[in-house]
Image (cartoon, grey):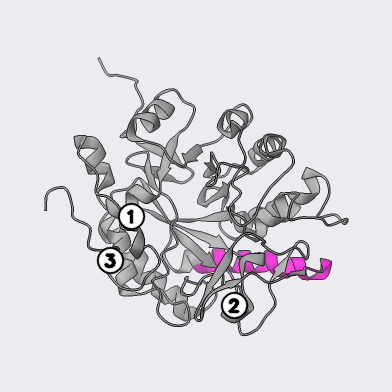
Amino acid sequence: MTSSTVDLFTPLQLGDLELPNRILMAPLTRVRTEQDHIPTPLMAEHYAQRASAGLIVAEATMVQEKCSAFVREPGIYNDAQVQGWKTVTDAVHAKGGRIFLQIWHGGRACHPDLNGGRVPVAPSAIAIANGECQTMEGPKPYTVPRALELDEIPKVVDCFRSATVNAQAAGFDGVEVHGANGYLLDQFLRGGSNQRDDEYGGSIENRARLLLEVIEAACDAWEPGRVGVRLSPLNSFNDMVDSDPLALVRWLSQRLNDYDLAYLHLMRSDFFGQQEGDVITACREHYQGNLIGNMGYSRDEATEAVESGQLQAVAFGVPYIANPDLVERFKADADLNEAKEEFFYTPGSEGYTDYPFIQS
């Protein structure tokens, strides 16, 4: 007799891909490019080490020039970057892995010092008030962004469309639209950063308009089964707040059913504990597709969430920094390596490709 029990090691049909397990690698900004935001062989080694993940979601990647929010994050807007990423995807596929690219615009989290003096853009001219941006000269306060004009918004959508086309050319298995963590699309979604009075502001439907236009563009450029989206309705990172995050997630969860996406990737909590609410349950009540949970899951909690059907998979962030063989460690119930936080955002291999494997 065969068992019908679903656990973390049960294969999963995720859009057009069949995953061998439900342990996903969350996107993690690690700023390891060198010049011109071009991915490097070191990045290829890093991702290939983690190829046993059910799916790797590669780090936030710029969809257009001069929208940098970090010193050395990657881009996907020119041929050299596409070729750099092709080295990464080839390395992952050679190890039997699967990899999506998270496509991203920093919005007001960008800084003029990182972008040739260009003033960042946002839904409204409201600066991030509670943090600093890391520049080549060190940390600096965020600047007041310029509110996007209505006639500029289609160009933003086109950049996400082009990024999707380029991701396919670079050999990725799909793209994840970054609608989370206080970057441009999330800035439009949430009322604290979006004070517009046109069709992109005010109601939830209006604030979600840009995100949905980007999703539609990505689906048109590839196909819905190759597109996922990440949301963080509670996360206050980058000075974000919304008056009713549960209403926002309920509305989005219903509306996203129209697209037949590969998945919805939902961050369940707030980095700083300022906003609370059960967004996973609120989403699950309405969203009919593959739901991926993220933020702070242990192996046992992830197993319970998958076995109960609340989630189809769980994405792990920090555990994947220090444990390239996280799937094998979970399967063996082995101890996990501790991540070296001092190397999260530094160049080089230390704290990046030098973590030991379980059998080494």
Marks 1 and 3 in Cβ contact (< 8 Å): no
Across and down, in percent, residue 259 comes to 63, 44
| First reached walking from the N terminus: tag 3 or tag 2 | 3
Q: Residues within 10 Å of mark 3 (few under 14, many from 20)?
A: some
**Which residue: 57% across, 79% down?**
114
Instruction: Check disc 3 and report the residue beneath it.
Output: 45
Across and down, in percent, residue 311 comes to 47, 32
Instruction: Check disc 2 and report the residue beneath it.
Output: 65
- SS class of the residue under badge 2? loop
Q: Residues within 10 Å of mark 2 (few under 14, many from 20)?
A: some
Across and down, in percent, residue 355 comes to 22, 58
Q: Nearer the viewer, residue 73 or 54?
A: 73
| First reached walking from the N terminus: tag 2 or tag 1 | 2
Amino acid, disc 1: Ile
| First reached walking from the N terminus: tag 1 or tag 3 | 3
Q: Nearer the viewer, residue 261 or 341?
A: 341
Across and down, in percent, residue 116 comes to 61, 85
Report the side of 174 relative to 287 (left or right). Answer: left
Instruction: Check disc 1 and report the residue beneath it.
Output: 321
Per the rendered image, the range of residues in magenta is 148-166
Q: Residues within 10 Å of mark 1 (few under 14, many from 20)?
A: many
Amino acid, disc 3: Glu
Marks 3 and 2 in Cβ contact (< 8 Å): no
Q: Residue furthest right?
A: 197
Look at discs 2 and 1 and give the one toward the viewer: 1
Label drawn at residue 135? none
- SS class of the residue under badge 3? helix
Calculate the distance from the C-alpha at mark 2 to the C-alpha at mark 1.
28 Å
Can residue 216 be seen here?
no
